[in-house]
Image (tube, rainbow, N blue to C red):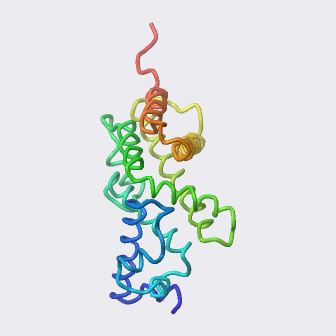
């Protein structure tokens, strides 16, 4: 069965979604290093070969778990799994609080270390162009920079501030901050990832709002 036809039938689509949901739950609960294909297959009631019938490989399954996690996070934030700039514009107003959003997201990540482990593990494999993680991280990075860059630009405009850096550069800084902070947390879980991220974004928030008061 080709990749294109694997999701062509209703039962196949439903089973594939069940596998993804089960894998995501197991990784989140048990940790990435304690997750096996055998656990996933047992959870969905089919053989290991049956699980891989719906995916090209175990790495392909793991990448799709990350995609599912991403869509859930974005949907929670914006009300759409893949929001357009028009949708983003409707949710950004002067009361919109980027610091709280980052705080909530970081707190969620700290509650599911297995998914953070998975993300870090697959990010290393992404250096291989032949691994499905390469396409995932390339596409994710591009989307995230566009997504975050638009939010940064729109939010700054709402407060009458002109950015001194390009929105894409600000988005890259945010990416580097959050990804690097996750690695530090995995190496030393005494690091308060939420507190550090919140403090960093509080400083960024002040910069994006600018000085709305006229100098005397």
Q: Can residue 103 be seen in this view?
A: yes
Q: In this view, does 42 lie above or below 119?
A: below
Question: At which x and y percent is residue 104?
Answer: 35, 43
Q: Can residue 167 be seen in this view?
A: no
**Most foreground residue, 180 or 32:** 32
Query: Which residue is drawn at the image coordinates 58% and 40% (left, top)?
Result: 173
Query: Which residue is drawn at the image coordinates 38% and 79% (left, top)?
Result: 42
Question: At which x and y percent is residue 212?
Answer: 41, 21
Quadrant housing residue 23: bottom left
Residue at the top extreme of this rendering: 216
**Most foreground residue, 71 or 17:** 17
Query: Which residue is drawn at the image coordinates 45% and 58% (left, top)?
Result: 115
Q: In this view, does 28 lie above or below 206?
A: below
Q: How many numbered marks appear?
A: 0
Horizontal relation, residue 142 to residue 67: left or right: right
Q: In which quarter of the image is the C terminus?
A: top left
Question: At which x and y percent is residue 87?
Answer: 35, 54
Question: At which x and y percent is residue 48?
Answer: 47, 83
Query: Which residue is drawn at the image coordinates 43% and 41% (left, top)?
Result: 154
């Amino acid at each position: 069965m080709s990749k294109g036809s694997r999701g062509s039938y209703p039962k196949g689509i439903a089973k594939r979604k069940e596998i993804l949901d089960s894998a995501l739950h197991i990784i989140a609960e048990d940790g990435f290093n304690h997750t096996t294909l055998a656990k996933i297959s047992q959870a969905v009631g089919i053989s290991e070969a049956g699980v891989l019938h719906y995916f090209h490989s175990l790495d392909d399954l793991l990448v799709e778990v990350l995609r599912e996690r991403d869509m859930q996070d974005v949907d929670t934030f914006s009300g759409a799994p893949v929001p357009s700039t028009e949708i983003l514009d409707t949710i950004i107003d002067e009361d919109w609080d980027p610091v709280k959003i980052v705080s909530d997201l970081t707190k969620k990540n700290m509650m599911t270390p297995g998914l953070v482990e998975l993300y870090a593990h697959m990010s290393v494999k992404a250096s291989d162009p032949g691994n499905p993680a390469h396409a995932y991280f390339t596409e994710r990075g591009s989307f995230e920079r566009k997504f975050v860059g638009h939010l940064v630009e729109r939010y700054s405009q709402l407060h009458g501030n002109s950015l001194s850096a390009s929105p894409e550069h600000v988005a890259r800084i945010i990416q580097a901050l959050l990804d690097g902070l996750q690695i530090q947390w995995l190496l030393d879980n005494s690091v308060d990832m939420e507190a550090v991220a919140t403090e960093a974004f509080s400083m960024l928030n002040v910069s994006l709002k600018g000085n709305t008061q006229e100098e005397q």
